[in-house]
Image (cartoon, grey):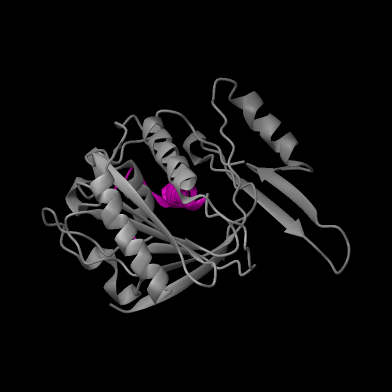
Amino acid sequence: MYMRSIIFLLLINLIVVSSLGYSYSEDCVKRNREPEVCTYTVNGRIFNSKQEAMDYIQNQNPNDVFEAYEEHKEIIINTPDDNNDINDFDEKENEKPPRPYIQNDNYVRSDKRIDFEQLKEHFIKETNEYRRKHGVPPLVYDKTIEQKAQRHANLLAKLRRLKHERDDIYGENLGTVYGSSGDDIVQKWYDEIKYYNFDNPRYTSQVGHFTQVVWKSSKKFGFGIAKDSRGQIYVVCKYFPPGNVLNQMAENVPRLKYKLYFI
């Protein structure tokens, strides 16, 4: 399958408010050595600070829940070529779409030692917290699945590239990061929620990580983490049963029980 790379910069403090009917934008300009100047727009109303914009939204929606996350890294998502778009697939039972992966290419060398077991614990808790927000059961951590994920992570570190394992038994999310601990990989998988249309629940290459993270029918999972000789970290998560079955999106990817704001 031919792949293309979509490069975009995740803005710091991106806010998702579409569920409330709000549009939000953050525009920043930096000229030469002058300080960066930002304006924040909510439904056409311009604010000089993010806090003013947030206060405005909160005042309009006093009963809503705010949850804060920071996003600030350049991401490359390798996706199927347009000629192989998922819409070309027939939605047959148990048919699996092409699987995307996330690569972080902030090339800043870091020799800081990373505790992979603590990182796995972080990923486990974060995954189940995201699932809780959608009202789906938590995943049970499985050591057998972990071993399979770890073997594949070790292979990726040896190959120095991301490549999905040919395996229909497990769902799989991949991620790689260079120059940091990689503790935001699961968050970036989940952040694809902003591209998912709950009113027209279909798989696209932009949402595959998110939909697998919250896939209701998945019961167990395991993480593998490895580092190559350059210091690049590879993260593999395998899920059982696998998600992203094309004709089962609606019943397995429920809406949020709580409104989320990325601020």
Say which residue appears at 68% left-offset and 31% top-offset: 56
Question: Which sits in the foreground, 43 or 5?
Answer: 5
**Image point (19%, 65%), residue name:** 89
Q: In this view, does 8 lie to the left or right of 45?
A: left
Picture quadrant where residue 143 is located: top left
Answer yes or no: is residue 198 visible.
no
Q: Residue furthest right?
A: 34
Q: Is residue 154 visible?
A: yes
Q: Left of 129 or right of it: where is 178?
A: right
Outermost top residue? 63
Which quarter of the figure is the C terminus placed in?
top right
x, y percent for residue 196: 39, 49
Farthest-out residue, left: 93
Span of residues in magenta = 184-204
Within the magenta stretch, is there residue 174? no
Q: What x and y, as percent, mark residue 96?
A: 20, 59
Residue under the point 24% across and 61% down: 97
Task: Say whether residue 53 is left or right of residue 224.
Answer: right
Q: Position of residue 260 (x, y in %)?
A: 50, 35
The N terminus: image quadrant: bottom left
Q: In this figure, what is the number of numbered marks?
A: 0
Residue 207 position (above or below residue 160): above
In the figure, residue 82 lies in which quadrant?
Answer: bottom left
Depicted 122 relative to depicted 76: above or below: above
Residue 230: x and y, percent? 54, 72
User: Relative to the observer, which residue lies in front, 245 or 26?
Assistant: 245
Q: Which residue is drawn at 43% across and 36% down?
A: 125
